[in-house]
Image (spheres, rainbow, N blue to C red):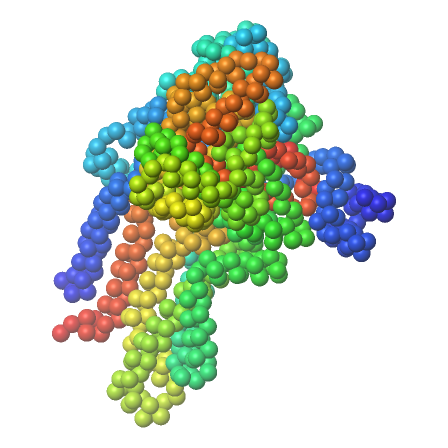
Amino acid sequence: MHPILILVAQRLALGFLLLLAASILIFAGTSILPGDVAQQILGQSATPEALENLRRELGLNEPAVSRYFSWLGGILQGDLGTALTNGRDIAESLGSRLANTLFLAFWAAVIAVPLAIFLGLLAVRYKDRWPDKLISGVTLTTISIPEFMIGYILIYWVSIKWGMFSSVAIINDSMSLGQKLNAIAIPVMVLTLVVLAHMMRMTRAAILNVMQSAYIETAELKGLGMLKIIRKHAFPNAIAPIVNVVMINLAYLVVGVVVVEVVFAYPGMGQYLVDHVAKRDVPVVQACGLIFAAVYIGLNLIADIVSILANPRLRHPK
Amino acid sequence: MNDQLKHLSDRVTKGLMTRREFVGRAAALGVTAAVANSMLSSAAKAAGPVKGGMLKIGSSGGESTNTQDPALAASEVPVTTLRMWGEPLVNTAPDGSLDFRAAESVEASADAKTWTFKIRQGVEFNNGKTLTAEDVMATMQRHTNEDSQSGALGIVQGISNMKTDGDNFIVELETGNADLPYLMSDYHLMIQPGGGVDDPTAAIGTGAYILEVDEPGIRHGFKRNPNYWDAANTGHADEVEVLVLNDSTARTAALQSGQVHLINRIDPKVAGLLDRAPNLGVKSVSGRGHYVFIMHVDTAPFDNNELRLALKYAINRQEMVDKILRGYGSIGNDMPINKAYPLFDDTIEQREHDLAKAAEHYKKSGHDGSPIILRTADGAFPGAVDAAALFQQSAQAAGIPLEIKREPNDGYWSEVWNVQPFCASYWGGRPVQDQMYSTAYLSTADWNDTRWKRDDFDAKLLAARAELDEAKRKAIYSEMGVSLRDNGGLILPMFNDFVDGVANNVGGWIEDPNDQMMNNLASIKCWVNA
C-alpha cells in the first residue's frame, strides 16, 4: 500500500481512539464534580422530597457505568438523547448552536487567515524595518489583551460611541445574511485580533527559516527579486508549519470562544456547554465534548495530511 | 415643573418635539438631564399607555437548560417568561396588597382555616379553553402531590384539603393562616389548563402574551394575546422579546446602544456611571432581599450565643452598604425583616458596629482562639468575597480570629450552603413575614439554614399566623424579630436594592419592592413610546 494511505489510515484510527478516550474522560470529569443534576436544577430552593423525586425521574440512581454505556449505544445509533434539565432533544438544540458556532468561526477565519498570511509575508519582505516592527507590535499587543477586554473596548467605541454595529450578537433563522453579518461584526473583529498574531508570527518564522536555506541563497545569487523568492521558493516549503498553526487557530475559533460568546451573548456551542456543565447535564456535556474533540482531532488530521502531501519525500517514495 | 417645561414636555408626548431637543432646552433652563428625563416619564405616564410596538428586554438569569414548566422556574428569565404567558390566582401589588388575577376575590373563615377563592369568569387560556375552578385545583394538586418537583412544594405543604364548588376554589388548612392568599401569589403557581399535568412546558396560561419563540438561554419571543381579559391595563406592546444577556457588561452595553429597552441586575459598581448616560435611567428599588452570613446555632463554636453576638457586633454594616452595594441598599439588623414588609416594627433598636462590645462578648464566649472559618464564593451573592474580607478586617480589629475560605461557585448551593456551619448566602425575601419565617426559621422548615429550632418561636409563628387582629400580629412578629436578632444564627448586614435600567422611551415603569423588574412584570406593564 502507498505509504501516504497507510499514514492517513493510522491517523484516522488514532483519531477514533482519541475520541473514545475523550468521552470517558469527560464522563469521569462530570461524575466527580460536586452536586448532581437534580440539586443544580432545583438550586437553593431544593427540598429533600423534590430532590428525590427528580433524581428518580431522571434515572440518576442507576450506576454511572451503565448510564455511560447506554448513552454511548445511543450515539452509535445516531441518537444524542434528551437533555436531563429541560427534556429537549439534544441533537436539535445542538444542531443550531453548532451551525452558529461554525458561522462565526467561518467569517473570522475568512478574514483572519488570509490577513495573517499576508501580514506574515509582508513582515518577511520588510524584515527588521518599520512595517515588520509595526505588524509585530500591533498583533502582539492585541493577543496580549484578554479577549473579553478587546470585546468590551470594541463594544464601547464601535457600538455605543459610533453606533455602527450591534453589541448583542444574537442571531436567528429569520434574519437575512446582511443582518446576521451586522450582528457578528464586532465578535468577528475580536476573534480576528485574537488569532492574528499567532498565525502571522508562525508564517513569518517559517518563511524566514526557509530563507536561511542554501537554495534561497542560490536564488538570490541568480538575481531574483525578494517577493518572487518568497512566493515561488520559500512559501511552498513553509506550508506545513503554517497549515499547522492555521488549523490550531481554526480549532480555537470553534471550541475556544466561550468568552466571546458570553460578552456578545452569541448563541454558540460554548455557552450551551457551560450552562449544562453547571447543571451536571451529562448527556449534553458528553455530546458537546465529543463534537469539540472531533473538531480538534479532525482539524489536526487535516494539518497532518496536508503536511504529508507537502512532503516530497513521502510523495515520491523510493 | 414650570409652565414652559410643562408645555415642552407635552410637545414631546404629542410627538411634536424630540426627546433630545427637550433635554437640550431643559438644560438651557437650568434643569439637569436626569430631572428632564423624569419629567418626560411623568408626562408620558399622564398621557397613558401607548399600545403597539416591540418591547425588548435584556435579562440575566437565563440558561440553555431552562424550561417553561412553572414548577421548575428558579432564575430571572424563566420567571419573567412565565409571568408573560401565565397568571397565578393573585399577585402581590407594589403596595403589599393583593392584586387579583385568576381569582376575582377571596374570603376567609373566622379561624383563617378555610379560604374560598372566587374564580374570575370569562377568562380564556391562550389556547382558547375557558378557565374553570377545576383548572385551578388541578394546578394546585400538581404542585402539592408527593411526586412534585415544584419549587412551591414547601409553600403549599400546610394544605389539608382542596375542593371546588361551582366557580369557587376552596382551600382548607391544618392550622389557620391569615396570609394564605400571599402564598398563592408564588410565581410557580401559574394556573394551567388541567393543571398542566399533560404538558407542563406548553406555556398555556391566562397571561397577556403568547410564547412564539422559545430558545432557552438565547431569547424568548412573545406576541400579544388577543383574548386577554385585562388588556386595558396590561400587555401594551404588540410584541415582546426577552434576550438572555447574562454578562453584566453586555447587558449595560445593550441598553446604552439602544438594542434593548429594559435590563435587570445592574452592577452597583457601574450604576452611578450608567445613570449619567442621557438616554436611560437607573432605577433602584429597595426590597426584601438580603445578603447574609449564616451560622449553624447547633454546631460548635456557633452554639455559643456570646460568640454569635461578638460576630454580630464586629461587622460594619454601613461599610458593607457603602462598599459592596455602593449605596444601593440599606443596613440590616440581623433579622430577615425590614420596612418593605407589612407589619414591620420600626421601633426595634438597630444594632450598631461596636468593636468594644464585640471584644467583650468574644471574651465572655471563652473561645479558644482557634480560627473561625467563614466560607464564601462570588456566587453566594455579588461581592460576597469582598464582603467577607471586610468582615474579616473588622473582626480582627476586635480580636476575633476570623478566617476566610473561598469556595468555588460551582456546587456552592449543594456543598456549602446549608451544609457548612458558617457561610455567605442570600435570601430573596418573601411577600409576608409569616412566609419568610416559616421558610427558614420554623423548626421543621426545609431551608432552616441557621438550624434555628425553638418551640417558643414556632408557637409564636403559629399564633401570629392564625391571628386576624393586625395589631396583635404585629406585636408577635416584633417579639420574634428581636428574639432572632439577639439569639439567632443570622448575621444580616444589608438588604440589597433591585437595580434595573430603563430606556427613556419606556413608559409605565413603577417601583415594585416585590422583586426585580417590577416583580418581573415590567415586560407586560411597560410600553414603548414611539
In depth, the one of A7 and B298 nearer the eye is B298
Residue at point 36%, 32% (across, down): B304
Residue B86, visible in the rendered structure = no
Q: Across the whole image, how many numbered discs are drawn on residues?
A: 0
Relative placement, left or right, of A107 versus B19 is left
Q: Relative to A6, does residue A58 appear above or below in the rendering?
A: above
Residue at point 86%, 44% (across, down): B3
Relative placement, left or right, of B332 versus B27 is left
Q: Relative to A7, does residue B174 appear above or below in the rendering?
A: above
Quarter residue B93 falls in: top right
In depth, the one of B277 and B452 nearer the eye is B452
Quadrant for the C terminus of chain B in the image = top right
Relative placement, left or right, of A34 versus A108 is left
Query: Percent position (x, y) of residue B317?
Result: 51, 42
Residue at point 22%, 35% (across, down): A64
Q: Which residue lies furthest to the right in this view?
A: B3
Quadrant for the N terminus of chain B in the image = top right
Relative placement, left or right, of B81 versus A140 is right
Query: Percent position (x, y) of residue A67?
Result: 24, 34
Residue at point 70%, 27% (across, down): B232
Quarter residue B293 falls in: top left
Residue A202, visible in the rendered structure = yes
Query: Percent position (x, y) of residue B277?
Result: 65, 53
Query: Percent position (x, y) of residue B184?
Result: 53, 20
